[in-house]
């Protein structure tokens, strides 16, 4: 169905209204065959890494559930953590849920004038979460994408091609950076 967090419906029906419960779908787990053990944990880790790599190719998150019932599961967790492809961000479940809840709550508006798209964020926060990204459908055909933060122009962001004519806007930073050392914190 989806790897992405979503709010669940009341009454388990898409005809009902959305609840305030944010579901964080589990993608993979340590339920592997009849028993997760010393003879199959390396095979499980290979499967997990394959799923993670495929999800990365689709810009999709992966949630791994490990039950702390056997020491071999700690070994498997360490192996997968040490084998991640470059660019994987590891988060605990609470931080991951907080990111998605804050992402949904961040108000923004868009306005297009000719071939210029303006995205306006309004927030009392001092900085936008640098992990936030936006997909702009047919963004490659635009002459310019402008970002405003509380009415002020933002000049620090990246635009990368995605699929078809879509683009991804990411690494949005409100503050200017004096030198590379300031950037490192992000």
Image (cartoon, grey):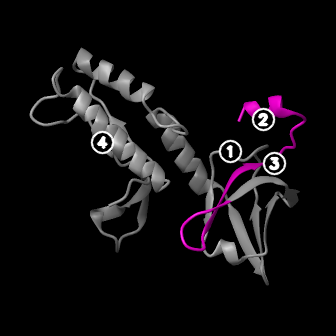
User: In the rendered structure, which segment of residues is drawn in magenta?
Assistant: 160-186
Q: Nearer the observer, disc 3 or disc 2?
A: 2
Q: Where is residue 51 in the image (x, y as percent from the top left)?
A: 35, 46
> Quarter of the image holding residue 155?
bottom right
Q: Which is nearer the N-term, disc 1 or disc 3?
A: 1
In this picture, residue 41 sits left or right of residue 64: left
C-alpha gap between disc 3 and disc 4: 36 Å
Q: Residue at x 70, y 63 (%)?
A: 108
Is residue 175 in view from this perspective?
yes
Name the outermost residue toward the left. 34
Task: Give the vertical position of 124 relative to 143 (above or below).
Answer: above
Location of residue 72 in the rendering, given as x and y in whole percent from the top left corner: 24, 18
Residue 33 vs 4, above or below: the answer is: above
Precedes in sequence: disc 3 or disc 2: 3
Question: Residue tagged by mark 3?
Answer: 174
**Contact between labelled residues 2 and 3, with CB atoms less than 8 Å apart:** no
Distance Cα–Cα, label 1 vs label 2: 11 Å
**Label 3: which secondary element:** loop
Lower sequence index among marks 1 and 2: 1
Q: Residues under labels 3 and 2: Cα distance? A: 12 Å
Q: In which quarter of the image is the N terminus?
A: bottom left
Q: Which of 186 and 48 is in front in this view?
A: 48
First of labels 2, 4 by sequence position: 4
Q: Is mark 1 in CB contact (under 8 Å) with mark 2? A: no
139 displayed left or right of 80: right
Q: Mark 4 points at which residue?
A: 28
Q: Does the magenta stretch include residue 171?
A: yes
**Element type at mark 2:** helix
Q: Residue furthest right?
A: 178
Nearer mark to the viewer, of 1 and 2: 2
Residue 130: assigned label:
1
Q: Name the residue under label 2.
A: 183
């Amino acid at each position: 169905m989806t790897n992405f967090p979503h709010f669940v419906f009341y009454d388990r029906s898409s005809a009902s209204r959305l609840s305030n419960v944010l579901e964080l779908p589990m993608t993979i787990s340590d339920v592997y065959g009849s028993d997760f053990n010393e003879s199959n944990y390396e095979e499980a880790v290979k499967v997990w890494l394959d799923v993670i790599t495929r999800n990365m190719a689709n810009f999709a998150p992966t949630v791994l559930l490990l039950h702390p019932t056997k020491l071999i599961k700690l070994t498997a967790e360490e192996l997968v953590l040490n084998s991640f492809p470059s660019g994987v961000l590891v988060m605990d479940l609470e931080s991951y849920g907080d990111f998605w809840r804050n992402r949904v709550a961040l108000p923004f508006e868009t306005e297009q004038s000719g071939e210029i798209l303006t995205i306006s964020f309004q927030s009392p926060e001092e900085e936008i979460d640098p992990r936030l990204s936006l997909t702009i459908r047919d963004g490659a055909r635009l002459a310019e994408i402008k970002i405003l933060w509380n009415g002020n122009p933002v000049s620090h962001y990246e635009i990368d091609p995605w699929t078809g004519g879509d683009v991804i806007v990411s690494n949005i930073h409100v503050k200017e950076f004096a030198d590379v050392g300031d950037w490192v914190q992000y």
